[in-house]
Amino acid sequence: MLPPTHRSPWPAAVIVVVAALATPACTSSAPYRRLAEAGAAYAGAVGSLSTAAATLAVDGSSARLLQDDALANVDLQTLRRFDEEDSHRLAVLARLATHARLMRRYFSLVGDLAAGRAGRTTATALGRLAAALDTAGEALRRTGAGAGVAAAVGPVQTGAGFYGRCLARKELTARAGTLRRELATQTDVLAALEQSMRRDAELLAAVRRQWLVVDPLLAEAPVADPERWMADRRALLDAAPALDELAAAARAAASLATALETLAGGRLDLARLDEVVTDVEAIGAALDAAGLRREGQP
């Protein structure tokens, strides 16, 4: 028993709970931090991808309009039809961006739990985020592009680092079913998105090659700016192989879902998390090579 002058500031009940939670499964926070970081990085990449897809969608349809207009003057009705189709695609992509933003925030908060940085409102915030993620997922599923959420755990106590690690494990295990469902939704959407982005990018590349490379070279007059012509030709050739990496998004979602499934079974598949990080880096490289990532995006 502690001497009266050194009495613990924690209530006895809290000390008992913390001691009970200090199991071998909770002795290291590193795996849970890695999972949270991988999840947040993946969700950030999906957000960047959705923004890039929106740009490609509009630019691709604009290129088609310009191609058609070169053959026969496009009428206002055709333009309105393209506008309606683009508006629908942008709405779906906005839902995906919202879904990804919520998922990124969720994993960031789980990372706070694992690192012992949680505040008293963290558990409530996680519950609300999980509910919002479920709602956003339903909106995505209703689009054809690709259950209730468990109640939030009680308020988080602060002060004990290993308690936070156990809470991170408890949170991820409790939400494993919800997260797998939302990742499955994203996997379906991302697989379809990869195909549409590839088509849009290939169309844009063909149109730009015609405008920037073929037409100036075949014109009777010499190319006005040879250095610019060479740079345009090189950029178009470099962007084509990078598009293959757009498939990395669906792979990352599947790897993250598998890692969560093994966690629910009592262990963490760190090799899967490494695959997630590798695929996230590939997505960023692909967007950079294609000139599709905005400044400040992850």
Image (cartoon, rainbow, N blue to C red):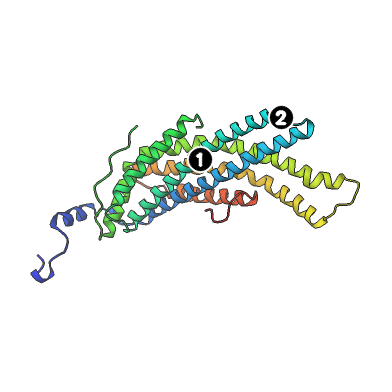
Please give the label number shown on residue 282: none
Is 106 situated left or right of 22 in this image?
right
Local SS, label 2: loop
Sequence-first tag of 1 and 2: 2
Local SS, label 1: helix
Residue 104: percent from left, percent from top: 43, 48
Residue extending furthest toward the right: 220
For disc 2, the neighbor class at 10 Å (few under 14, some 14 to 19, many from 20) is few
Please give the label number shown on residue 94: 1
Image point 64% across, 50% down: which residue? 291
Residue 233: percent from left, percent from top: 76, 50
Looking at the picture, does residue 32 appear above or below residue 127? below
Residue pointed to by mark 2: 75
Q: Nearer the viewer, residue 229 or 87?
A: 87
> Quarter of the image containing the N terminus?
bottom left
Q: Which quarter of the picture shows residue 227?
A: bottom right
Q: Which quarter of the picture shows residue 61?
A: top right
The count of marks equals 2
Residue extending furthest toward the bottom: 5
Is 98 situated left or right of 85 in this image?
left
- Inspect the image, locate mark 1, and give the three-letter code of the amino acid beneath it: Ala
Is there any visible trace of residue 190 in the rendered image? no
Residue 125: percent from left, percent from top: 32, 48
Image point 66% across, 38% down: which residue? 60
Q: Nearer the viewer, residue 91 or 273?
A: 91
Task: Determine the CA span between mark 1 and mark 2.
Answer: 29 Å
Is there any visible trace of residue 202 in the rendered image? yes
Q: Nearer the viewer, residue 4 or 87?
A: 87
- Inspect the image, locate mark 2, and give the three-letter code of the amino acid beneath it: Asp
Image point 36% across, 42% down: which residue? 130
